[in-house]
Image: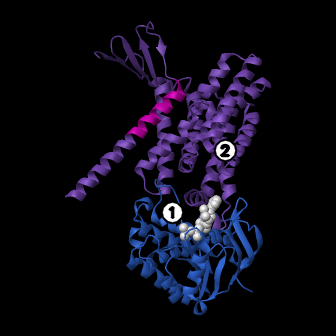
Chain colours: A purple, B blue
Amino acid sequence: MNALTAPPLYDLILDFGGARVIFSFKILVGVIAPIILKALAVGLLTSVCAAMLGVPLVLKRYSMIGDGLSHTGFFAVAVAAACGAASGAQIYITLPLVIAVAVVLLLLSESGKFKGDSAIAMICTGAVALGYIIFSLSSKGTGDVCSSLFGTAILALNMDDVAVSSVLAVGVIVVFVTLYNKIFSVTFDPAFSKSAGAPVKTVNVLLAVLTAVTVVVGMKMIGSIMISALVVFPALAAMRVSKSFKGVIIVSACLSAVCFLVGLFFATVVKFQFRSGGFADVQIPVGPSVVCVNVVALIVCILVRKVKTARAKKKAAN
Amino acid sequence: MSLISFEKVTLGYEGQPVVKDLTFEVNKGDYLCVLGQNGSGKSTMMKALLGFLAPMSGRITRDPKLKNAIGYLPQQEPAQSDFPASVYEVVLSGCQNRKGFFPFYNKADRALCEEKMALLGIADIAGRSFKDLSGGQKQRALLARALCAAGDLLLLDEPAAALDPVAAEELYVLVRALHKKGMTVIMISHDPERAIRDATHILHLGQEMLYFGPTADYDRPAILKRERGEIT
Ligand SMILES: Nc1ncnc2c1ncn2[C@@H]1O[C@H](COP(=O)(O)OP(=O)(O)OP(=O)(O)O)[C@@H](O)[C@H]1O
Ligand SMILES: [Mg+2]
């Protein structure tokens, strides 16, 4: 790195010779600012939903449900696209489909007829295969496939998308908070909850439905392949740093929100230029960026935990 | 009317009977101790009593007022070993049954929870992580949770299993005191001496019901002979 120059307003350029990293802050106030704001609103809400739901799902060993549902989501998008639904209207087809599969998945694995993971593996692969066949038959471009797999659509949200997604996400948060005590009890000790008259099955089904809604909303921003990362990573990270259930949920939600912010920042503000690419602007896509930040956050939390226990041990030894 | 009655009840799993011909009843203020070897169906009976398991035949009746007044201490440890929950959260979840559909706890619930924690001597570890406790401390927390839930009936499945002799004795004294105050207790135990000392009634299970009746009439040597006789 040699020169540190900032020719246009708000831009910060790090020049490594063969590669340049550009922090293009001006886009935050430029024409695409509204686009980023929309992505921010939907992204933050969905990240928080996924992270909160992730805690009980991970603890119930249901974290793969997010995966199963997102693959179903891919299938559902294919169906919706084949039906000719415009991208804003697709959610009216995908949402009920994914919710239905969520409930079936949950009941299947509860009934013990299939082990949860094999039921999910079946649905995952089957749904993706069918979905791609439908995409091909309805001769939609690979753009659609790519977008629903990797979630490139977050920077293409219109106001209707934002409204529907926000309402759904806020709904998920409200239901979750209202059910919080029941969710704790049912996840911690189903036998006791049942003896205390808690509607164990209903709570489980509701959890699945909430997850389905989150997955459908989140698919747009992060893609069906990676949405379960938002469910699993913040929950796992939060479990390293907090001792109480409430603490874990709060840390998980906050961490997820921060990770999304950082991820979105890297995907929008930061641009790269490489000599091999003739110094043309290239950017990281939003979904993978957010997921990678989540990975880093988890690693940091694991290290923090390691350091903490090592210190405690040292203290005990003295 | 009795709180709970079993009439010629046969219990089992997937068509295989575990215990046959259970007939007994529990009245308000009873202290029933359930004895029997491992696998004799004690926990199974408890599950049926709670309504988790439908009887294969016979009839179980429960007083409807028990619906939200049962405090249950399961035999198995509840969650996986990595579940993040503070002791306070665990005990407070015992207040759930009195909330019905109302989603949040109030001051009275918190006060009840703190009272039960003090009663069991775990008030000072309220903020600790449940998963880091010793077996005995966990058992106390779960008992405190059961007490929060118990209005009329306390169901204990081997409550002393993880406790040292002193703590076990404390627990039996506590249960006896609760019973003296009017709580109906059903306790599964592997400690017949204590059972005979404290309980008003004994239920001894083998593959069938070996004994049910008042403690005073419980002829232990004779029952044990029958228990052995069935096995050999
Ligand atoms: N979920 C289940 N499915 C099938 N069989 C079961 C199930 N639970 C228990 N059993 C069987 O029922 C029998 C009675 O089990 P139960 O748990 O009631 O014994 P217990 O008297 O409580 O024994 P312990 O003193 O070891 O707790 C055992 O043979 C056991 O294998
Ligand atoms: Mg048992």
Type of amino acid at the residue the image marks with label 2 = Phe
Taking A259 as reference, is B13 above or below it? Answer: below
Give the quarter the ligand 1 occupies. bottom right
Residue hosting label 1: B77
Q: Nearer the viewer, residue A99 or A49?
A: A99
Q: Are marks 1 and 2 in contact (CB under 8 Å)?
A: no
Q: Nearer the viewer, residue A2 or A250?
A: A250
- Residue drawn at the location 52% of the way across and 73% of the way down: B158
Location of residue A259 in the rendering, given as x and y in whole percent from the top left corner: 47, 37
Report, in whole angstroms, how far the alpha carbon at label 1 lies from the one at label 2.
25 Å
**Few, some or many C-alpha atoms within 10 Å of disc 1 (few <14, some 14-19, many ≥20)?**
few
Whether B155 is drawn above or below A68: the answer is below
**SS for callout 2:** loop
Write down the chain letter for disc 2. A
Q: Which residue is mark 2?
A: A114
Foreground pick, A125 / B35 = B35
Magenta-colored segment: predominant secondary structure: helix
| Magenta-tinted stretch | A285-299
| Disc 1 element | loop
* Residue A92 appears left or right of B137: right
The amino acid on which the numbered mark 1 sits, given as a three-letter code, is: Glu
The quadrant of the image that shows the N terminus of chain B is bottom right
Which picture quadrant has residue B148? bottom right
Residue A103 percent location from the top left of the image: 71, 46
Q: Is residue A214 left or right of residue A310?
A: right
Residue at image location 64% in from the left, 83% down from the top: B211
Is residue A171 something that shows in the picture?
A: no
